[in-house]
Amino acid sequence: MIPSIEKERNRITGTLLAYYFICKRKMWLHAKGLDLENITGNPDVIKGKILHETRFKRESYQNIDFDNVKIDFLKFGDQIYVHEIKKSKKFEEAHIWQLKYYIYVMQNRGVNCNTGVLHYPSSMKKVDVQLEEEDIKLIEQALQQIKIILDSPMPPERLDKKFCRKCAYFDFCFV
């Protein structure tokens, strides 16, 4: 692993990695301590928290927190399986990369983990996720790019997408 990535890994959360794939400006603002989703009472965030609190309550190993990683729950078998609960499939690609990042972090800690599952309880769907060799390279490239963005004194350019209207950071981009 590249030394600077190892150092920055402790600064980069799974949420930041997911935001990297959704909106780099949102990622930058969140990393600078502007956690508006938890401050504004965003209805989507509240629904997501309720899902986390009410679903999968019987899982023994919940809310695993280490190295700035917060995994919803783990299951054990021939390896360790990482499970993440998400409100909607709207940002499924970002969710997949967040889960792959968690698997990557587990592997870097010497844990036998190659697979995870994304759960979308609202739509009763689940997505199996496997960390492949080429994914590791893409994660390491993303970590390098995230470091560059976070070290910048100014946020990246804003997006102008349909989903921006519901974003908790909307005022930082359009007002």
Image: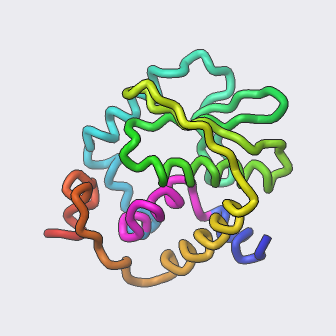
The residue lying at 40 percent from left, 33 percent from top is: 49
Q: Residue furthest top?
A: 58
Q: Position of residue 56 (x, y in %)?
A: 54, 21
Q: Residue furthest bottom?
A: 153
Q: Quadrant of the C terminus?
A: bottom left
Q: Quadrant of the N terminus?
A: bottom right
Q: Position of residue 54 (x, y in %)?
A: 45, 20
Main SS, magenta residues: helix
**Camera-side residue of 7 and 102:** 102
Left or right? Give the position of 43 relative to 137: left
Is 113 inside the magenta-drawn segment? Answer: no
The residue lying at 71 percent from left, 28 percent from top is: 75
Is 172 located above or below residue 73 in the figure?
A: below
Q: Residue furthest left?
A: 175
Is 17 inside the magenta-drawn segment? Answer: yes
**Magenta segment range?**
11-27
Residue 65, quarter of the rendered image: top right
Is 120 located above or below residue 45 in the figure?
A: above
The residue lying at 60 percent from left, 47 percent from top is: 99
Q: Position of residue 6 (x, y in %)?
A: 74, 68
Residue 27, quarter of the rendered image: bottom left
Left or right? Give the position of 145 relative to 40: right
The answer to whether residue 33 is visible is no
The residue lying at 31 percent from left, 48 percent from top is: 39
Q: Position of residue 128 (x, y in %)?
A: 61, 37
